[in-house]
Image: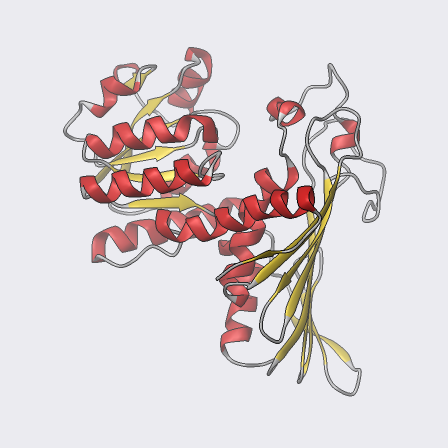
């Protein structure tokens, strides 16, 4: 039985804890958080006794019975927490974005390796049902040689973040790098999962909402040898609103992916359906009912983490692998600032 301590009992931790509770051979035995109120609330919710609730990481890291630390805190805290957990001999699952700089990310990877512990980054987007299905299509060669992919993400979110409005993640207002840092970790990892490593990147970014410090819309081109991907992403568009947004201001992400190939066009719709347009121009539903199932994606991700620990297999999103995602994230800002493409070797 693998024993887990989760640190960071805020907004997103419930998905992690629900997933852990469903996996065989693993048990969450401790929680840690700076805020006692949130800590005690999660403790009651998941039936973890008060003697296993901690506000100081050093206290739970001293426990010999804890094998895994699940870090669900902001990136500013990651270098310290990863280093402490690694030196205490704990395997680590760390939330994205992995770090605030590439140098910090590289140092965390080095420390984990030096301490002989396993380190994986919590990139759940690739584990969403539609992307798992599309990956199988691509591996089967259904599209033949690829031409163009268009990845589109829409939300009408940041214009509604007025001062005083309650938000599930209020720190979004102050982040100097927002959309392609907070969400780019997901998107770039998914693109790498589906299409491999791009050779070059060009970015145009813009801040539309007056209520935030960072960017909330942008267009990115990723170039391959004979194929390119366009990312059209925005948290400040009304384009896909089917009705007036609700009173509660929270993310309501809508994603589409269109992949053009020599044998046809695959289209992922915002409801999760996957359609196919053949070379005669006939469109039909290829897969119905796939969902952007965020809660279930954590179950798949954490199940993968445990399978790899149990069998000595490599993590799909190891700390070392995530360095490639981080390079794309930071190159986005470099390209936008310099108005030039960034090339990768």
Q: Nearer the viewer, residue 264 or 15?
A: 264
Is residue 96 visible in the rendered structure shown here?
A: yes
Q: Is residue 43 above or below residue 342?
A: above
Q: Nearer the viewer, residue 46 or 107?
A: 107
The residue sitting at 35% across, 21% down in the picture is 32
The residue sitting at 38% across, 21% down in the picture is 43
Residue 182 lies, in percent from the top left, at 58, 38
Q: Quadrant of residue 131?
A: bottom right
- In this picture the colour scheme is secondary structure
Residue 332 lies, in percent from the top left, at 62, 47
Extreme residue toward the left, this view: 64
Q: Is residue 213 above or below residue 245?
A: above
Q: Viewed as shown, does residue 211 lie left or right of 133?
A: right
Extreme residue toward the top, this view: 36
Q: Viewed as shown, does residue 217 lie left or right of 144?
A: right
Q: Is residue 111 above or below residue 222?
A: above
Residue 198 lies, in percent from the top left, at 55, 63
Q: Quadrant of residue 156?
A: top right
Rendered-image quadrant of the N terminus: top left
The residue sitting at 24% across, 51% down in the picture is 309
Q: Viewed as shown, does residue 41 lie left or right of 143?
A: left
The residue sitting at 72% across, 83% down in the picture is 278
Residue 81 lies, in percent from the top left, at 33, 28
The total number of labels drawn is 0
């Amino acid at each position: 039985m693998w024993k887990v301590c989760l640190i960071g009992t805020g907004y997103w931790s419930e998905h992690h804890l629900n997933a852990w509770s469903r996996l065989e051979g693993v048990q969450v035995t401790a929680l840690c958080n700076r805020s006692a109120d949130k800590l005690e609330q999660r403790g009651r919710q998941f039936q973890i006794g008060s003697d296993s609730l901690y506000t100081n990481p050093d206290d739970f890291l001293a426990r010999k019975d804890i094998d895994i630390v699940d870090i669900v805190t902001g990136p500013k805290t990651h270098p310290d927490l990863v280093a402490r957990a690694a030196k205490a001999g704990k395997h680590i699952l760390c939330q994205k974005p992995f770090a605030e700089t590439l140098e910090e990310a590289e140092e965390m990877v080095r420390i984990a390796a030096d301490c002989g512990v396993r380190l994986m980054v919590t990139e759940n987007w690739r584990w969403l049902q539609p992307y798992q299905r599309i990956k199988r299509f691509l591996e089967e060669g259904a599209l033949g040689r690829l031409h163009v992919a268009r990845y589109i993400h829409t939300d009408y979110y940041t214009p509604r973040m007025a001062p005083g409005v309650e938000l599930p993640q209020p720190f979004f207002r102050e982040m100097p790098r927002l959309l392609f840092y907070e969400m780019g970790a997901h998107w770039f990892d998914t693109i790498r999962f589906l299409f491999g490593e791009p050779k070059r990147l060009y970015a145009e970014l813009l801040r539309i909402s007056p209520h935030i410090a960072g960017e909330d819309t942008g267009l990115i081109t990723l170039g391959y040898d004979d194929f390119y991907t366009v990312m059209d992403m925005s948290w400040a568009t009304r384009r896909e609103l089917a009705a007036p947004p609700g009173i509660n201001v929270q993310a309501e992400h809508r994603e589409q992916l269109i992949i053009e190939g020599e044998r046809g066009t695959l289209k992922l719709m915002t409801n999760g359906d996957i359609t196919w347009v053949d070379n005669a121009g006939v469109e039909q539903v290829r897969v119905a009912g796939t969902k952007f199932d965020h809660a279930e994606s954590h179950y798949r991700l954490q199940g993968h983490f445990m399978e790899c620990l149990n069998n000595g297999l490599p993590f799909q999103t190891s700390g070392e692998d995530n360095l490639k995602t981080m390079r794309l994230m930071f190159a986005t800002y470099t390209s936008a600032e310099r108005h030039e493409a960034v090339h990768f070797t």
